[in-house]
Image (tube, rainbow, N blue to C red):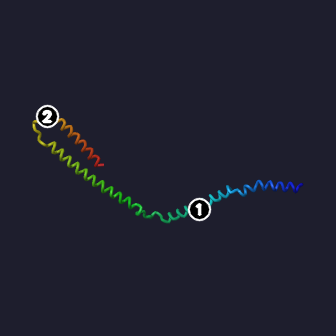
Amino acid sequence: MFLGGLCAGAIGFCIAILPDYFNSNDQLSSVLLDQKEIHDQIISLSETVSELRNVGPSANFSEELDPFRISLSKLSADIKVRSSAQEKEITALKERIYLLENRPLNGEVSASVMQNYERELTQIRAEIEAIVNKAAR
């Protein structure tokens, strides 16, 4: 009877333990696999950091910055061209206003026409001042 109980206990123990032993979803093996992957990543990152430290602060990034320098020089040249064109337009407008202000008027011009002229002249002056201020920035 003792031997029968021992056999029954051994069979019960095996039935309880064996399914977990043969289970492919073993959590320990997946944890070990994840740990190995993380370890490999750490080694890879450590090598990258070592390479970067070897490069040091004297790294020359001129190749990476060349497109930016070219774009910046083109942009600067474009701004200078546009600025000079605006200055020419402003000069032409100032000369035109000077000629309009100093031209002789006939006595045939009515007061309303003169008021409209002065109003337009004031508006043009304000526009020129705005352009000059914008160009000066």
Left or right: 51 in relation to 114: right
Q: Position of residue 64 (x, y in %)?
A: 42, 61
Q: For the residue marked with disc 2, what is the amino acid?
A: Ser
Q: CA distance from mark 2 to mark 1?
A: 93 Å
Q: Is residue 100 left or right of residue 73?
A: left
Q: Relative to residue 54, is residue 129 depicted above or below?
A: above
> Mark 1 belongs to which amino acid?
Asp
Residue at 16 percent across and 36 percent down: it is: 113
Q: Residues within 10 Å of mark 2 (few under 14, many from 20)?
A: few
SS class, disc 2: loop
- Residue found at the very far left of the displayed protein: 107
Secondary structure of the residue carrying tag 1 is: helix
Q: Quadrant of residue 14?
A: bottom right
Name the residue carrying label 2. 110
Image quarter (top left, top right, bottom left or bottom right) of the N terminus = bottom right
Residue name at image x 77 percent, y 53 percent: 16
Q: Identify which residue is drawn at 16% across, 42% down.
A: 101
Q: Which residue reaches farthest right?
A: 1
| Farthest bottom residue in view | 54
At 32% from the left and 56% from the top, the residue drawn is 76
- Farthest top residue in view: 111
Disc on the earlier residue, 2 or 1: 1
Position in image of residue 123 (x %, y %): 23, 40
Q: Which residue is mark 1?
A: 40
The reply to whether callout 2 and callout 1 are in contact (CB within 8 Å) is: no
Q: Residue 102, how many percent across, how many down?
A: 14, 43
